Image (cartoon, rainbow, N blue to C red):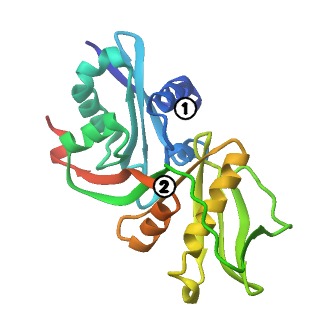
């Protein structure tokens, strides 16, 4: 097989990206990189047929483009996946791999080509609907807040006329997913307020025709417990690793 790896524009791999997202069917946290100019993309050509693509960005500094974060090969060509990935490393000059563990193709490449692998964050998907209520606690939204292309914020919980928690959800990931964020006042924590807020944000997301998702740092046990209590379950991890020996196979 004669392989070419050619740097191109995001618009040129749009169809491949749609197939990638449909095949995986989960919130892809790197999706927005293509729309904010944070990524360089490459198309893979085998015997003049386009067979897949890859994307890189900077893990610590976005402009460095030192990390592979997206990689897709059409199924008939996956028997060549290791050789293609090796050449992709060489062509892009990357030093690291970053991926979601539920992206099985790139996770396989991570474990084949990288060392010093660790999990940075936990990914969550919705599992069950909860029905929490706390006496005297009310959910609302700042009337001045409006949804935009990237964010729906301004939601809060009030108790005894005091705002005790704030939150919202990001909309700049692959449709239909919305990424929940929240913060509970430090002196009001461990009362179930966080889980109540997540529960109500999930309802708002579903009303918009979207699907709730969330993530937290691997060591943030409080956030993990809050999300699980609110009916979400871990569905993957964000993994990172350093490419070993120049990607030799």
Q: How far apart are labels 1 and 2 at the CA level?
A: 36 Å
User: x, y (%) of residue 172?
Assistant: 63, 49
Q: Give the class, few, some or many, for how many residues have Cα within 10 Å of label 1's Cα (few <14, many ≥20).
A: some
In the image, is residue 153 above or below residue 234? Answer: below
Name the image quarter holding the C terminus.
top left
Q: Which mark is residue 232?
A: 2
Looking at the image, residue 156 sits to the left or right of residue 189; the answer is right
Q: Could you say where residue 169 lies in the image, as x and y percent from the top left?
A: 64, 58
x, y percentage for residue 220?
A: 40, 71
Tell me which label, 1 or 2, sits earlier in the chain. 1
Who's the residue at 85% across and 67% down the image? 144
Residue 190 appears in the rendering: yes
Asked whether the viewer can see residue 150, the reply is: no
Can you tell which of label 1 and label 2 is closer to the viewer? 2
Total marks in image: 2
CB within 8 Å, label 1 to label 2: no
Q: Is residue 174 left or right of residue 123?
A: right
Looking at the figure, which quarter contains the N terminus? top left
Residue nearest the observer in this picture, 226 or 91: 226
- Residue 192 position by quadrant: bottom right
Q: Nearer the viewer, residue 213 or 32?
A: 213
Q: Residue furthest right?
A: 143
**Circle 1 sits in a helix, a strand or a loop, which is it?**
loop
* Residue at x 35%, y 21% (from the top left corner): 4
Under circle 2, the secondary element is: strand
Q: Quadrant of residue 157?
A: bottom right
Residue 241, percent from left and from top: 26, 53
Say which residue appears at 67% left-offset and 51% top-offset.
205
Residue 9 — which label? 1
Name which residue lies at 56% across and 27% down.
Answer: 14
Residue placed furthest toward the bottom: 187
């Amino acid at each position: 097989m004669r392989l070419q790896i050619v740097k191109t524009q995001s618009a040129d791999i749009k169809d491949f990206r749609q197939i990638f997202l449909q095949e995986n069917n989960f919130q892809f946290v790197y999706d927005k990189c293509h729309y904010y100019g944070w990524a360089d993309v490459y198309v893979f050509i085998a015997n003049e047929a386009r067979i897949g693509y890859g994307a890189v960005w900077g893990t610590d500094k976005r402009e460095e483009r030192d990390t592979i974060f997206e990689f897709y090969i059409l199924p008939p060509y996956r028997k060549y996946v290791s050789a293609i990935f090796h050449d992709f490393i060489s062509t892009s000059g990357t030093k690291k791999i970053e991926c979601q563990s539920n992206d099985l193709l790139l996770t396989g490449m991570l474990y084949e080509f990288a060392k010093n692998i660790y999990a940075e964050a936990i990914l969550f998907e919705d599992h069950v609907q909860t029905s929490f209520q706390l006496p005297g606690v009310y959910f609302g939204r700042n009337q001045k807040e409006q949804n935009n292309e990237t964010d729906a914020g301004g939601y809060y919980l009030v108790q005894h006329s005091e705002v005790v928690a704030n939150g919202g959800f990001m909309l700049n990931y692959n449709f239909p997913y919305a990424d929940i964020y929240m913060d509970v006042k430090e002196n009001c924590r461990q009362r179930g307020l966080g889980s109540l807020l997540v529960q109500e944000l999930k309802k708002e997301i579903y009303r918009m025709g979207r699907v709730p998702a969330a993530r937290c740092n691997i060591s943030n046990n409080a956030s993990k417990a809050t999300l699980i209590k609110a009916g979400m379950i871990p569905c993957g991890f964000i993994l990172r690793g350093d490419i070993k020996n120049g990607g030799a196979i």
